[in-house]
Amino acid sequence: MNRRTFLAAVPAAVAVPGAVAVPPVTAHSDISASPIMTLFHDYQRLSEAAQQHVCIEDDEDAELERLFYRERDQIVGRICRLPCVCASDFAAKLIVDTCQGMLFSEWDTGDLWREARALVGAPGFMVAS
């Protein structure tokens, strides 16, 4: 049995409190069309547009917020509320939840880490301090 066959046979969605039920992804071509990946492509488009934008207003932060970041933040919220149905979904969540690797949420309280623990079947797993 190869990895794709195995993953297709295993339930892909994990119950996350407050999450919306999404049908499991079963084929490689479906991965880019998952709800999270569709939103992630919008997130990428806005991030790239913000990087390339030349500000014309004195308050550059307000201009970028108005043109790009407000919408991108709404997309991040929507991504984080959806359950992962494939590995690329979790990777997309990791990218947006960590602000592209710049920040990390708390292990015990961060929604990303709660979902990660649920995905591996260890929802109560805690690291001893």
Image (cartoon, grey):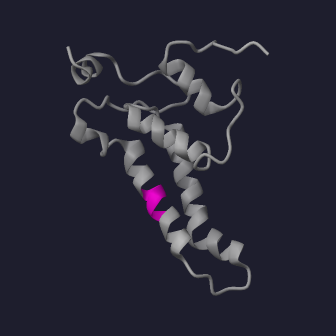
Q: What is the magenta segment's predominant secondary structure?
A: helix
- Which image quarter is the C terminus in? top right
- The percent position of residue 112, horizontal first and vertical second, equals 59, 32
Is 10 on the left-hand or right-hand side of 99?
left
Report the residue at 68% width, 85% height from top. Answer: 57
Which residue is more in the foreground, 106 or 17? 106
Q: Is residue 63 above or below residue 108?
A: below
- The percent position of residue 119, horizontal first and vertical second, equals 48, 21
Report the residue at 30% width, 45% height from top. Answer: 33
Within the magenta stretch, is there residue 45?
yes
Q: Quadrant of residue 31?
A: top left
Is 5 on the left-hand or right-hand side of 84?
left
Q: Is residue 3 above or below residue 39?
A: above
- Which image quarter is the N terminus in? top left
- The percent position of residue 16, horizontal first and vertical second, equals 52, 25
Q: Quadrant of residue 60?
A: bottom right
Q: Is residue 18 above or below residue 121?
A: below
- The percent position of residue 81, horizontal first and vertical second, equals 53, 38
Which residue is more in the foreground, 72 or 103? 103
Q: Which residues are magenta?
A: 42-46
Residue furthest to the right:
129
Q: Is residue 25 above or below residue 117?
A: below
Report the residue at 53% width, 19% height from top. Answer: 118
Is 29 on the left-hand or right-hand side of 99?
left
Across the whole image, how many numbered discs are drawn on residues? 0
Within the magenta stretch, is there residue 73?
no
Report the residue at 54% width, 39% height from top. Answer: 94
